[in-house]
Image (cartoon, coloured by chain):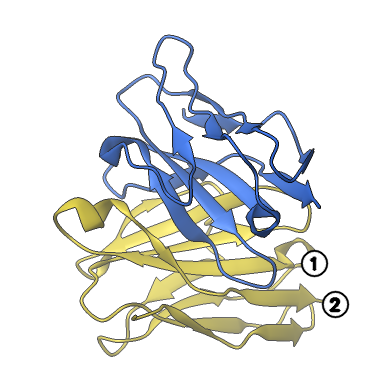
């Protein structure tokens, strides 16, 4: 069964550095998402992406964040200048475009980002 | 604004006992409600959704619009049901983002 994949599984970076988190969504899916979960807190929506543009973003998704689908298969989340409070598990998700299966978002295993 | 509340962080039951994981939501439109499950060291996966009115692994959930609830139930818990359970809501926004509750850890003791 196809799965969403994410790399790396764990990223350690210093405050102020740029990081890029990578995701490969399921191949025929058209909607893509990033969520994050700070340790001990809720899973929070960051951004949704469709047709090569952001369709919705949360207040968390400020100018330090950006997303891109550079090559038709990867979906990336970039944090320009990391802060300590960006430390979290970041989940990528994708979903199909039509039918009952379009209601389900398929999640990747997550990337744990640690900012020191 | 949309909000999902799961009042219990931890629910511990014995094998064979009934289970009810509570979920309440706040949303002004017509929501779609989901239960996601995360087993140890695995990814979040969809357990069930209210529109399909199905039973998965013996779990059911009924959307009660009057009480704005979507509680997850199973009549006889099994040890393999031990996991983190998240209730989630999708509204009628363009991106169909999910709003998650805080999650309930279910522990089923032998």
For residue B92, say whether it is visible. Answer: no
**Residue A73: % across, % down:** 30, 87
**Residue B7: % across, % down:** 70, 28
Q: Residue at x 69, y 67 (%)?
A: B40
Image hue for chain B: blue
Is residue B93 left or right of B14 when viewed as pictured? Answer: left
Is residue A28 left or right of B67 when viewed as pictured? Answer: left
Image hue for chain A: yellow
Is residue B80 left or right of B91 when viewed as pictured? Answer: right
Label 1 and label 2: CA atoms lie apart by: 6 Å
Residue marked by disc 2: A116
Marks 1 and 2 share the same chain = yes
Residue marked by disc 1: A84
- Nearer to the camera, A27 or B53: B53
Q: Residue at x 74, y 32 (%)?
A: B8
Q: Are marks 1 and 2 in contact (CB under 8 Å)?
A: yes
- Nearer to the camera, B104 or A41: B104
Q: Secondary structure at mark 2?
A: loop
Q: Is residue B39 above or below residue A14?
A: above
The picture quadrant where one finds residue B29 is top left
**Residue A76: % across, % down:** 44, 79
Q: Residue at x 62, y 31 (%)?
A: B20
Q: Secondary structure at mark 1?
A: helix
Is residue B91 left or right of A9 when viewed as pictured? Answer: left
């Amino acid at each position: 069964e196809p799965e969403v994949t994410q790399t790396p599984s764990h990223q350690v970076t210093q405050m102020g550095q740029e990081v890029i988190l990578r995701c490969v969504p399921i191949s025929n899916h058209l909607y893509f998402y990033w969520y994050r979960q700070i340790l001990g807190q809720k899973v929070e929506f960051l951004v949704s992406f469709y047709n090569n543009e952001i369709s919705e973003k949360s207040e968390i998704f400020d100018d330090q964040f950006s997303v891109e689908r550079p090559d038709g298969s990867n979906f990336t989340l970039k944090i320009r200048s990391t802060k300590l409070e960006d430390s979290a598990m970041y989940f990528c998700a994708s979903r199909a475009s039509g039918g009952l299966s379009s209601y389900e978002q398929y999640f990747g295993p997550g990337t744990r980002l640690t900012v020191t | 604004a949309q909000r999902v509340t799961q009042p219990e962080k931890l629910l511990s039951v014995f094998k064979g006992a009934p289970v009810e994981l509570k979920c309440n939501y706040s949303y002004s439109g017509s929501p779609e409600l989901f239960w996601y499950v995360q087993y140890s060291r695995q990814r979040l996966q969809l357990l069930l959704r209210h529109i399909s009115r199905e039973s998965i692994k013996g779990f059911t959930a009924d959307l009660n619009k009057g009480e704005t609830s979507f509680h997850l139930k199973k009549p006889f818990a099994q040890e393999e049901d031990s996991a983190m359970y998240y209730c989630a809501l999708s509204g009628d926004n363009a991106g169909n983002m999910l709003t998650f509750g805080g999650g309930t850890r279910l522990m089923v003791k032998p």
